[in-house]
Amino acid sequence: KNEVEQSPQNLTAQEGEFITINCSYSVGISALHWLQQHPGGGIVSLFMLSSGKKKHGRLIATINIQEKHSSLHITASHPRDSAVYICAVRPPKVEGADGLTFGKGTHLIIQP
Amino acid sequence: DTGVSQNPRHKITKRGQNVTFRCDPISEHNRLYWYRQTLGQGPEFLTYFQNEAQLEKSRLLSDRFSAERPKGSFSTLEIQRTEQGDSAMYLCASSLSSGVKTQYFGPGTRLLVL
């Protein structure tokens, strides 16, 4: 079973700061997801990546497959970025196995 | 299409009662997943379907839990003889099985067992 660790667990920062959230996992994967969850439960998929780097607006996600590590960066952070950010990994491409394994999440608060 | 929908959004029940939740995936998605999330934790995988076939079940899915997707469209998750430890958010997601396999999540059903 893959062990997914995120750091930090909690992060409070000032508006405008550059934010980095880290994710490491223990076993090889086929893809990694970064998800955003707001109070009340709704989960939004931010990125799915299996190599390299992806950028969407102020969000950047990177992954290093050899080191089993991924980072999510937020540039020019804003209070509306306040949410729980969750890393989830997809198992290798094996017949019938497709359930994601999730980290516990990073609770981010951006203060104005 | 309005995305993944789940009903009910909230359910309060007494210990020992049976409950059933429904998930309607994005219409063209042939994969449907069920997850459970307890307070302060990340979601945990329960089971998933490709079309009507249930392809994987977690050890978390005890014999009190059963999921179906009879026509390959909506799915139901039933919990029999509920226990207080079943209190959680039950999340459904759907995706394609080929190409871009991003999972799209529903709003969840929050269950409270008294």
Image: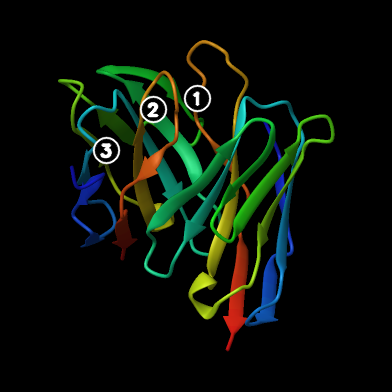
Q: Please tell me which of labels 3 and 2 falls first in the chain.
A: 2
| Image quadrant in which you'd find residue B23 | top left
- Work out how far the residue at label 1 is from the one at label 3, CA to CA, in angstroms: 18 Å
Asked if B96 appears above or below B111 in the picture, the reply is above
Residue at figure coordinates x 50%, y 25% from the top left: A98
Tell me if residue B86 can be seen: yes
Chain letter of the residue carrying label 3: B
Asked if marks 1 and 3 touch (Cβ < 8 Å), the reply is: no
**Could you say where residue B70 lies in the image, as x and y percent from the top left?**
17, 21
Amino acid carrying mark 1 in the image: Asp
Asked if marks 1 and 2 touch (Cβ < 8 Å), the reply is: yes
| Image quadrant in which you'd find residue A105 | bottom right
Mark 3 or 2, closer to the camera: 2
- Work out how far the residue at label 3 is from the one at label 2, CA to CA, in angstroms: 11 Å
- Work out how far the residue at label 1 is from the one at label 2, CA to CA, in angstroms: 8 Å
Chain letter of the residue carrying label 1: A
Task: Between residue B67 and residue A2, name the one nearer to us.
Answer: A2
Amino acid carrying mark 3 in the image: Leu
- In the image, is B93 to the left or to the right of B18? right
User: Which residue in the structure is indicated by mark 3?
Assistant: B77
Query: Which numbered dot is residue A98?
Result: 1
